[in-house]
Amino acid sequence: MAATAQELANQGTMRAGEDVQDNERRLPMQRLLDGTAEAEADDTSSIQSRTDNPAIVTFKDLTVTAKTRKQVLLKGLSGQIKGGFWACMGPSGSGKSTLLNTLALRLDPAVSVVGDLRLNGRAYDNAQLKRMSGYVMQDDLFNGNLTCEETLTYTARLRCPQDANAAQRKVRVDGVLRQVGLEHARHTPVGTPLRKGISGGERKRLAVAQELLVEPQLLFLDEPTTGLDSVTALSLCHTLRKISDTCTVICTIHQPQSKIFALFDNLILLKSGDIAYQGPAKESLAFFEKTGFPCPPLTNPADHLLDSISLTRSDSSHSLTDMDLASAADLHVRFTRPHFDLLHGADKPHLPLRRTTSWWLQFTVLLERSFKEQSRKTDMIVTQLVQVLVMALLIGFAFYQIGTDQHSVVLRKPVLFFCVINQGLFSALAVINSFPGERMLSLRERAAGTYYTSAYFMAKMLAETALQIVLPIIFSCLVYWIVGLQPVASKFFIFMGFMILCSLGATSLALLVSAFARTTDLSVTVLPFMLETFRLFGAFYMPPSNTPNYFEWLNAISYVTYSYIGVSINENTDLTLTCTESELIEVNGVTQCPVPNGNVVLEKDGLNRLSMGACAGILIFYIVFVRFLAYLGVRFLKW
Ligand SMILES: Nc1ncnc2c1ncn2[C@@H]1O[C@H](COP(=O)(O)OP(=O)(O)OP(=O)(O)O)[C@@H](O)[C@H]1O
C-alpha cells in the first residue's frame, strides 16, 4: 500500500540511492529498513486520553493466522490503546474484527495467535478481562419478551456484586438507562420477529447499557453503527464518546460519516491485516497529507483515509520532494509502529476483579427470568393448549366409550398408542424452533461471564417442564374419561403419570437434537426422523413378541416403548372383557370369550415382559440421561 511503511521505505531507498551523499535525507529510510527506526521513533504520548488512569492494552508483534488456509490475518501488529474513544477502521476484510476479537480474547478456534498481549503491562486471561471489560457484538440478541428495564435488571442481578441490594441495583439500572438515553423506552418490550419492540438504535443502546452495568474499564464494540441510519448512528457515537470519559472505548467501524469521525480521539487504520496508521484521529489527515495524500476539500475524512490506503504513491497527484519523502517515512514509523513500553501500566495496582454471583443466585434469577419469558409467550401457550384440547377431543370421540366387549380389544391398543405418541410432540417442535435462538443468547451471556451453564440449563429445564407437565394433565383428564378407559382413580393417575413422562421424554429428545445440531434446519430434519423411528419401534406395530433380534435394541432405546407398555399394563390388568353368546368359544372344555381379559392381550403381545414400575423407572432414567447429554452439548459445543 502507498501508505504502508514498506512501500514508502522502498520508494525512499530508490531515491536515496540516487544521491548517496544526502545522509540527512537517507537516514530515516535506512533506519526503517534496518529495523532500528522503531526503537528510536517517537513514543505514544500523543495518544488522546480523556480518561483518568485508563486501562492500557498493549499488543506487540501480534500475528494471527487462519489454521486451515495458513492465511495471515494480522501481520505482526504492535500498538497501545489507552483511554478515550478509539476507532478501528479499514476496508472490509482488513482485519478490524480480528484485531478487536484478539484483544478481547474472543477468537475463533480456527485461528492461531502469536505475539504479546498485555493489559496494564501484565499478560491477561479471559477471566481477568471478562471481569473488567464489556463486549458489544455486532448483532444484538435479547429475550424479546422482556422490557428494557427488565433486561437490565436481570443482567444487574446476574453480573453486579452479590452484596448489592435491590435498591442499589435499581439506582445502577436507572443510571445506565439515563447514560445511554433509553429512559423513555424503559417499559417497552425489546421485541421479537413477530412483535415489534424497541428500534434498532435502541437495541444497540440496550446492548451497550448491559455492558455498562458492571462499570467496565474497557469497552469493545464490533461495528456498533452497522444497520443504523446516520442520525441514530451519530447519536449512539455521542453516547459512546461520553462513556469514554471514564472508560476506554474501542470500536470497529467501516466508513463513518464525518461528524462521527470527529468524535474519535484515536484511530487504528488497517489495510490487509497491517496497520496503515495509528494515533490521534485528528492528526491522521495531516499524516496522509505529508505522505502525499492531501484530503480534497469537502471530503469526508474517513472516506479520504480509506481511499488513500487503497491507492499507491503513483496514484497521488501530489508530488513530494525528496525531503518530503524522507520525513514521510519517518512519520510512517511513528504512526504505524510507534515505540511503546510493553510494561506500561504495570506499576498500577492489580485491577479489582469483579466478584461473581453464586450458582444458586444465578439459578433463581434465571428461573424467574425463564418463567417470565414463558408466561409472555402467550400465543405459543394458547396454540399448544388449543392443539392439546383439539387432539384430546378428536381422540376421545373417535374412540368414544370403547367399553369392554371383544371389539374393544381391537380399539384399545391403537387408542393407547395414539395417546402415547401424541405426548410431547408439539412441545418437542416448540423446543426445536426456539432453543437455537436462546442458545446463541446464552453463549453470549456466558462469554460475558454472566452465569454458569449448569445454572442456565437447570433453570430453563425447570421453567419449561411446567408447561410440559400441564399439557399432558389436561389431555389425560379429557381423553381418559371420554374414551372410557377403566374407571379406577389409581389407574387414571398412573395413565396421567405415563403421559407426563412421555411428554418429558419427547422434549428431552428435542433438546438433545438441538444441543448437538449446528442449525435449526438440521434439528428440524433430524428430530422427525428420530421420532418416527421411535414410533415404529414403540412396541405397537412390532410387539416385543414379534420383534426380530436385530431390532430389539431399537425397541430398547425408544421412550415410546416404555410409555406404551406402561399404559397397556395399567389398562389391561384386572380388565375383564365381555362377549355376546354367539362369540363364546370352548377352550379345554371351558366356555369363554375369545379374549377373556386384558392379561391375555398383554401376554400375546409380549407386553408383560416388563413391569409398570420398571417402565416408569426406565423413563425417568431416560429423561435425566438424555437431558444430561443435552447439557454436555450446550456446555461444550460453541455453535
Ligand atoms: N477463522 C477464520 N478463518 C479464515 N479466515 C478468516 C477467519 N476469520 C477471518 N478471516 C478472514 O480474515 C480477514 C479479515 O476478517 P475480519 O472479519 O477481521 O475483517 P473486517 O475488517 O472486520 O471486515 P468487515 O468490515 O467486512 O467485517 C477476512 O479476509 C476474513 O475472510
Image: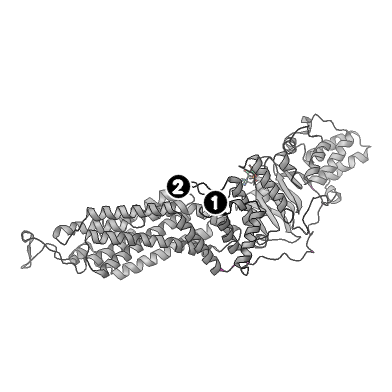
Residue 120 falls in which quadrant of the image? bottom right
Characterize the magenta stretch by its predominant secondary structure. loop
**Residue 315 image label:** none
Which one is nearer the viewer's eye here, 313 or 371? 371
- Please name the amino acid that badge 1 sits on: Val
x and y percentages locating residue 476 in the rendered image: 30, 61
Region of the chain picked out in magenta, as a range: 337-359
Say whether residue 349 is magenta.
yes
Which one is nearer the viewer's eye here, 10 or 193? 193
Q: Read off the residue under disc 2.
A: 521
Ligand 1, seen in the image, is in the quarter at top right
Question: In the rendered view, does 534 fall on the left or right side of 2?
Answer: left
Residue 287 falls in which quadrant of the image? top right
x and y percentages locating residue 272 in the rendered image: 69, 41
Quadrant where the N terminus sits is top right
* Residue contact at pointers 1 and 2, CB within 8 angstroms: no
- Please name the amino acid that badge 2 sits on: Asp
